[in-house]
Image: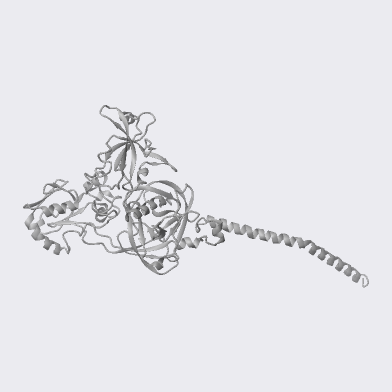
Amino acid sequence: LVHVLPGYLALRCSELMAKIVAERCQKSPATKTNASQSKARKKAKAKQCKAETKAGFGPRASSDRDCKNKKKRVGGDIHSSVLKLFVSHCKPNYVQPWCSNAQTSSTSSAFPLKLASGENILVTNAHSVEHAALVQVKKHLQEQKWVAQVISVAPDCDLALLKVPSPSFWKGLQPLDIYSGLPNLQDVVAVVGYPTGGESLSVTQGVVSRVDLVEYAQSGSTLLGIQIDAAINSGNSGGPVVNKSGALVGVAFQNLSDEDEDTENIGYIIPCEVLMHFVNDYRRHGRFTGFGSAGISFQTLEQSGLREWLGLTKGQSGVRVKSVDASGPAFGIVKPNDVILCVDGHQIGNDGTTSFPRGRIPFNYLLQKYYCGESCELTLLRKGESGNAGKLKLRLTLQRNMPFVSPEAGGPHGMPGSMTPRYVIVGGLVFVPFSRPYLESAYGEDWADDPSKVNVELLSLVSNGSKEGPDHEPVLLTSVLASELTLGCQGMGSEVLDTFNGIKVRNLKHLADIEDESQGKYLHFTFKGKDDIVLDSSAAKKALSAILSQNMIHAARSKEL
């Protein structure tokens, strides 16, 4: 063993060294292959990052040139364009309109847009800045608050425009791109804003569920809206909703309450089509003027007997005109029992809908796309005295249509969106316009959910009231200020005024004008409920100053009157 073992070990060492050299020679091409695989993996990773970036909610769609120049927006850029609003509200008391309620505060969201003129503006919801005494805005990840000014409000579509006077505020703040058109069903969207539950920015994701006409809670108007299944909570109001490319597809504004229905995650956003209608309206007129309307109420024609009676032939369809608003543009032109067959050549179905890129939609949508003052063509079927029906075409200049009981407080002589309270006090009798703001002040914001606490006569006006002319508004006796002059009247209130000194009262300003011109011995008020109040004219004028002083009222009329 002493002689054999060294030779054996030497032989094994030689074999092992040869094997190692051979393996190293074999591994040389493998090293190059692994390097190529590594480059391929890096290239695939870069492509994947780009794909993930496109699929994320940060950037806008951009060209390869943008990528090379590194001008493509990243997720943080979208976030930096979403702002937090801090608003102090001073809501008037519409029952006692010479004073206001205690101030309240709220937070919501906003985002910047650039107008074609180059002007920078902020967009938020109208209800976010309603009765605003002070509006402040804060950028993402910054502590400074900037004072903003409300420059236009569109209550119909629950939108408002703001400006920040300081030029330094706009440095580094990039406006959002607007998506042209409507999103498709099941398109992925993200809601970005500052909802309740925390102080920092929040992003919730969902898909487009439906595109249809929606009732806007702020005004009761029915306009185009988009339903999504992403959570929209308090504080999200006014925040942007963006698609995969980071382009704006809508503005968050309301959700569906699940108190009475088994619903989950049903939110609504204002589409860019509605937003741009408001923005362009502001550019044209310097204020909001409204959406086009003909002021017509209609009945669907799904009854075959009714269609035959109206003279519709096979292949014709449309809706029957039930009534025409006396203050609307169609009054005196379109008649009851006319059948509206087409709007600008778009055929109307017997169910009151017309074709739409996302299916069918109520034909009112065709009118709402117009600006106030623009005209559209109606094709009607009208039955003559002989009983024969014939077609006719006419052009109608559209206007903003407001319900009899207005969601605004400014009245027929006020600017659109005005919420300024108005009142007239005559001998201790307090008169105000009957409006939805009054209902909220008198019976609470949830009055519609519990109508039993509202006067039946007032409810009837809300549901069935109609204007008798373009400047007609209901005038209400809201309270009687106690004095010797008003003895026996204290129990009266919430009475709708019909005539004053035998003259039909058209609106609150008309009441003030009649009082100014009154020279008779008595002030005689007649109400819709057939109750009367008669005051001595001379005694009422003498007592007024003391009545106002006793109740700490600075004037017998609001400033506008």
- Quadrant of the image containing the C terminus: bottom left
Image x and y of residue 171, in percent = 43, 66
- Count of numbered tags: 0
Is residue 516 among the parts visible in the rendering?
Answer: yes
Is residue 255 among the parts visible in the rendering?
Answer: no
| Furthest residue toward right | 3
Q: Residue at x 55, y 62 (%)?
A: 69
Image x and y of residue 331, in percent = 26, 41
- 430 lies left or right of 78: left
Q: Residue at x 17, y 51 (%)?
A: 510
Image x and y of residue 235, in percent = 39, 59
Q: Quick one: 483 or 214, which is closer to the camera?
A: 214
Q: Is residue 183 above or below residue 8?
A: above
- 55 lies left or right of 44: left
Image x and y of residue 428, in percent = 13, 57
| Furthest residue toward bottom | 2
Q: Residue at x 15, y 54 (%)?
A: 512
Protein image colouring? one colour
Q: Quick one: 249 or 342, which is closer to the camera?
A: 342
